[in-house]
Amino acid sequence: MNDLTTLIDATEQTLTRIAADFSPAVFASSLAAEDMVLTDMILKAKLPISIFSLETGRLHQETLAVLDKVKVRYDHDITLYRPQPEAVAAYVEQNGLNAFYNSVEMRRECCRLRKVEPLGRALAGNKAWITGQRRAQSTTRAELHVQEDDAAHAMTKFNPLADWSEQDVWDYIRANDVPYNALHDQGYPSIGCEPCTRAVQPGEDVRAGRWWWENPDSKECGLHMVDGKLIRIKSVAA
């Protein structure tokens, strides 16, 4: 069991190393609890790591409200990347607004348009990117490493919270009075687009509320996948 102080020190060292050795680097924030931990660390340390979020057009109001909370607390504006409106309009016209419920393929195409394509634009020109993924979040992330070679984007990818538990995340948030998404207090441990996210029941997996109609093995939006497989291609020793 990892001591939280040890985890914090290791994470801060990782972020400092990224800023020093992998500049320019960007942090992809979903505005969820894990990402608020990293946001707090990056902004308090004034690290030269830019922060962006994907505004898919289907986010909860509570999620969008986190942007204002960050502005008030840290006087920082998170950069937003949005999908190409023409591509989204074509998908909706051809398949319907909520076609993602019909099949995994249709859901992944919606994710591709609203998340994966904007992510590509957000990452362009950077040497590394950072995520708030944790190994304990789901079976699809069991092989997660703190540092990975993301060949798909020709850059290095960091998951500084890979070793953190959900309890670690919330202990940090409470100890440092970090702002967070109000949905977390309503039974939403993992938050995505509004129509694809529900609250979970006691005892359920933390990502059970994401694409709840799908098999657990398919529950990824594509941001961390290449040709249908998670980007666990190659870990890099820290």
Image: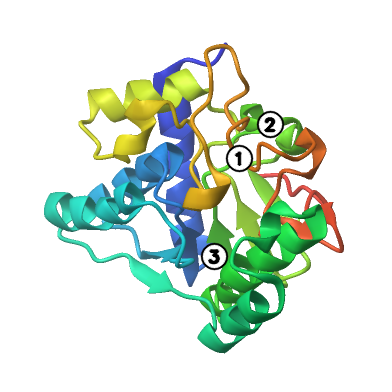
Residue 59: name its quadrant. Answer: bottom left
Going by the numbered disc 2, the residue's amino acid type is: Ser
Q: Which mark is residue 228?
A: none
Label 1 to label 3, Cα distance in Å? 32 Å
Position above or below: 116 against 221:
below
Residue 77: name its quadrant. Answer: bottom left
Q: Secondary structure at mark 3?
A: loop
Q: Secondary structure at mark 1?
A: loop
The one of 45 and 115 positioned closer to us in this rendering = 115
Q: Which mark is residue 210?
A: 1
Residue named by callout 3: 22
Q: Nearer the viewer, mark 1 or mark 3?
A: 1
Looking at this rendering, what residue extends furthest in the bottom direction?
Answer: 86
Residue at the image position 48 percent from the left and 72 percent from the top: 24
Percent position of residue 143, x then y:
77, 36
Going by the numbered disc 3, the residue's amino acid type is: Phe
Residue named by callout 2: 138
Going by the numbered disc 1, the residue's amino acid type is: Arg
The one of 89 and 21 positioned closer to us in this rendering = 89
Q: Are marks 1 and 3 in contact (CB under 8 Å)?
A: no
Label 2 to label 1, Cα distance in Å? 11 Å
State how many labels appear.
Answer: 3
Which numbered disc, 2 or 3, marks the residue that appears first in the sequence? Answer: 3
